[in-house]
Image: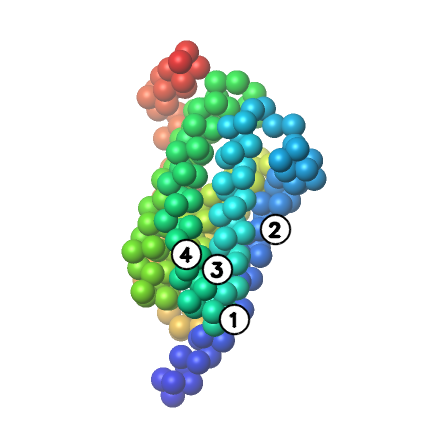
Amino acid sequence: MATMVSRQTLRSDDIFFPAMTVLILGIVVTGFAKSYFLAGMFRAKLPNALVHIHGALFVSWIFLLLIQASLVAAHRVKWHMTLGTLGFILPPLMVVIGALTLFDSIRRNQLDIPPELLLIGDLENLLLFIVLISWGILARRDASSHKRLMILGTLALMGPAIDRWQFGIIVTLGVILTLPLLVLVYDLWSLRRVHRTTAVAYAMIAAAMLTVIPVSKLAFWHQWVVWIRHT
């Protein structure tokens, strides 16, 4: 019976996790279609070279995630491990360039939401991403934890793409809170329980999203915005 459950889980994993990467790609493409993808990507009229680098890095990560999940589903584990070297390189670059791009956006003062909310929201997203992805890399020998953390860590970055659907901040936060629940529901279906990694990662994401608005109202963030705009 244990062998049958293990094989069923492996087969369902081979469908679910690649499907989640396709969903993530769909969210990113629909969110940035007009300003980036349909505008020709590298030919898009973005504010500066920094934003181009930022876009290229983040899109590269999404495609890497899709390829890696597909390789595992196709049982090309050695190729997956070889290509995984990029998983050590891209995330730190994404966080550094992401933070610089965020500061540049605040400095240009072309925002649809309060700068304090943008600052704390994007910093939380980047922090969640690097923590969960780093955890996933460290847990790469534990396949069940590793694949969940790669997906959940990337889902933590979906805020800017979802925000461009222009349904408002509350809807954006609601979607960000809902997407990781797909992993939780999958756990209940495939494992008959919530995987410990899923529970901890979702708790981190939920805590960040539920506190972002009240935390953004602290005077500290306004002072930081003023500092960024005068540097």
Question: Is residue 208 visible to the viewer in this orientation of the structure?
Answer: no
Q: Earlier in the sequence, mark 1 or mark 4?
A: 1
* Label 1 sits on residue: 74
Q: Earlier in the sequence, mark 3 or mark 4?
A: 3
The residue carrying pointer 3 sits among few (fewer than 14), some (14 to 19) or many (20 or more) residues within 10 Å by Cα, namely many
* Label 4 sits on residue: 84
What's under tag 4, amino acid-wise?
A: Gly
Q: Quadrant of the N terminus?
A: bottom left
The vertical placement of 162 against 52, above or below, is: below
In the image, 186 versus 61, the foreground residue is 61
Q: Distance between the Cα atoms at labels 3 and 4?
A: 8 Å
Residues marked 1 and 2 touching at CB (< 8 Å): no
* Label 3 sits on residue: 68
Residues marked 3 and 4 touching at CB (< 8 Å): yes
The vertical placement of 43 against 206, above or below, is: above
What's under tag 3, amino acid-wise?
A: Gln
The residue carrying pointer 4 sits among few (fewer than 14), some (14 to 19) or many (20 or more) residues within 10 Å by Cα, namely some
Q: Quadrant of the C terminus?
A: top left
- In this view, the mark in front (2 or 3): 3
In the image, 32 versus 225, the foreground residue is 32
Residue that protrudes farthest toward the left in the picture = 138
* Label 2 sits on residue: 26
Asked whether, in this view, residue 177 is left or right of residue 221, the answer is right
Q: Distance between the Cα atoms at labels 2 and 4?
A: 22 Å
